Amino acid sequence: MTKPAQIKIKLQLYCGDAIAMGPGKADLLDAIAREGSISAAGRAMGMSYRRAWQLVDVMNRCWHGPLVETFPGSAHGGGARISALGHAVLTHYRALQARLAGEATCADAEALASMLRAQPLERQDERAG
């Protein structure tokens, strides 16, 4: 059975050419808040510490202050937490995401979905047949 056409809105905020916030970075912030460290958050999301740190670094350089604060730890390692600015950015981002998802049911979205195929044609020349 073929599922109906769908519309998905992906919200990305840019700082120059860098993505300052997007779905993956928001999920990483949630994971850092939950796990208490960048490495544990990365593991929970199936990414390397290096990749998680790169994403945090971009976020921290794109906003008026860091979204993630790190702190040294004992022999067991350090940790990380979401800053007050990070919580504010994440809250507004998630609210905007929810609003856009709700608006994806508007008349324009419904019109586009009605004109969209559920699956692409195998070949362009199928259209003529």
Image: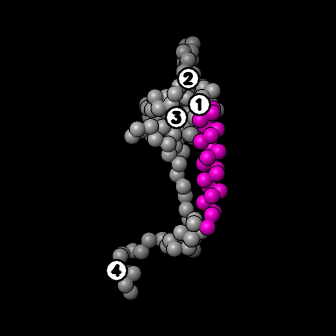
Q: Which residue is mark 1?
A: 86
Left or right: residue 50 versus residue 88 is left
Percent of width and height locating residue 94: 62, 43
Tell which circle, 3 or 4, labels the residue nearer the N-terminal end: 3
Q: Secondary structure at mark 1?
A: helix
Percent of width and height locating residue 2: 55, 72
Tell which circle, 4 or 1, labels the residue nearer the N-terminal end: 1
Q: Nearer the viewer, mark 1 or mark 2?
A: 1
Q: Nearer the viewer, mark 4 or mark 1?
A: 1
**Which label sits on residue 69?**
2
User: Local crowd at mark 3 within 10 Å, few (<14), some, or many (≥20)?
Assistant: many
Tell which circle, 1 or 2, labels the residue nearer the N-terminal end: 2
Q: Which residue is mark 4?
A: 125
The residue shown at (63%, 58%) is: 103
Percent of width and height locating residue 71: 55, 17
Q: Which residue is mark 3?
A: 42
Q: Which residue type does callout 3 highlight? A: Gly
Rendered-image quadrant of the N terminus: bottom right
Residue 75 visible? The answer is: yes
Label 4, label 2: how far apart the Cα atoms are: 55 Å
Seen from this angle, which residue lies furthest bottom? 129
Q: Which residue type does callout 2 highlight? A: Glu
Rendered-image quadrant of the C terminus: bottom left
Q: Nearer the viewer, residue 124 or 98?
A: 98
Label 1, label 2: how far apart the Cα atoms are: 9 Å
What are the residue bounds of the magenta stretch? Answer: 87-107
